[in-house]
Image: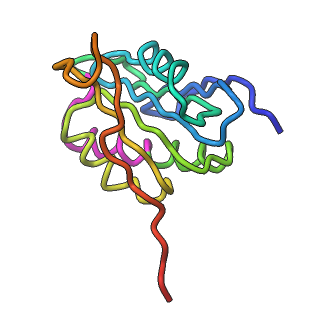
């Protein structure tokens, strides 16, 4: 069943899921401190990743310096992020997840603590110093493999 573009609000996050190709992977653009959707889409269009869907997330009050109010708010954002990603991984049948994020480090840490349910995923980093990519751009920084459970 092909998914069509959808946009909705899940309490603290505005989310938009769009089909962008025939791949099995899900890319996620998380814009907390500033919008990154265009940069992520440009990267995906030019890369050889096998992404079939792009999920964009932004706090309901918009991206910016005041998007995260305090510690409890950060925890709530992280918990909802986990549920949203887990649901979208299941709905799209994604075999791997690619995460792009602009967020305070504390929020990113909390999101990471809850990310084990995503299956294998790769985090991407922006090359601010332009040491890896001329003109700046994204590159994979950390990949978390599928965890196998021994009996």
Q: Is residue 124 left or right of residue 83?
A: left
Outermost bottom residue: 151
Would you say the magenta stretch is mainly helix, strand or loop? helix
> Is residue 72 rendered magenta in the image?
yes
> Is residue 133 rendered magenta in the image?
no
Observer-nearest of 75 and 101: 101
Q: Position of residue 143 (x, y in %)?
A: 37, 49
Residues rendered magenta in the picture: 67-81
Total count of labels: 0
Q: Is residue 72 left or right of residue 11?
A: left
Outermost right residue: 1
Observer-nearest of 147 and 88: 147
Q: Quadrant of residue 77?
A: top left
What residue is shown at x 74% (from left), y 26% (from top)?
4
Q: Quadrant of residue 33?
A: top left
What residue is shown at x 68% (from left), y 48% (from top)?
93
Q: Position of residue 65 (x, y in %)?
A: 21, 19
Q: Position of residue 44 (x, y in %)?
A: 51, 24
Outermost left residue: 129
């Amino acid at each position: 069943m092909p998914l069509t573009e959808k946009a909705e609000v899940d309490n603290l996050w505005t989310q938009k899921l769009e089909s962008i190709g025939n791949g099995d992977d899900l890319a996620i653009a998380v814009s907390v401190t500033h919008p990154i959707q265009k940069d992520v889409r440009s990267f995906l269009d030019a890369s050889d990743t096998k992404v079939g869907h792009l999920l964009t997330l932004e706090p309901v009050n918009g991206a910016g310096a005041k998007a995260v109010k305090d510690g409890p708010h950060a925890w709530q954002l992280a918990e909802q992020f986990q549920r949203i990603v887990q649901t979208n991984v299941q709905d799209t049948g994604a075999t791997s997840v690619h995460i792009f994020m602009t967020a305070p480090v504390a929020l990113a840490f909390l999101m990471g603590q809850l990310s084990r349910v995503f299956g294998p995923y790769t985090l991407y980093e922006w090359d601010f110093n332009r040491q890896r990519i001329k003109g700046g751009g994204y590159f994979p920084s950390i990949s978390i493999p599928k965890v196998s459970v021994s009996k």
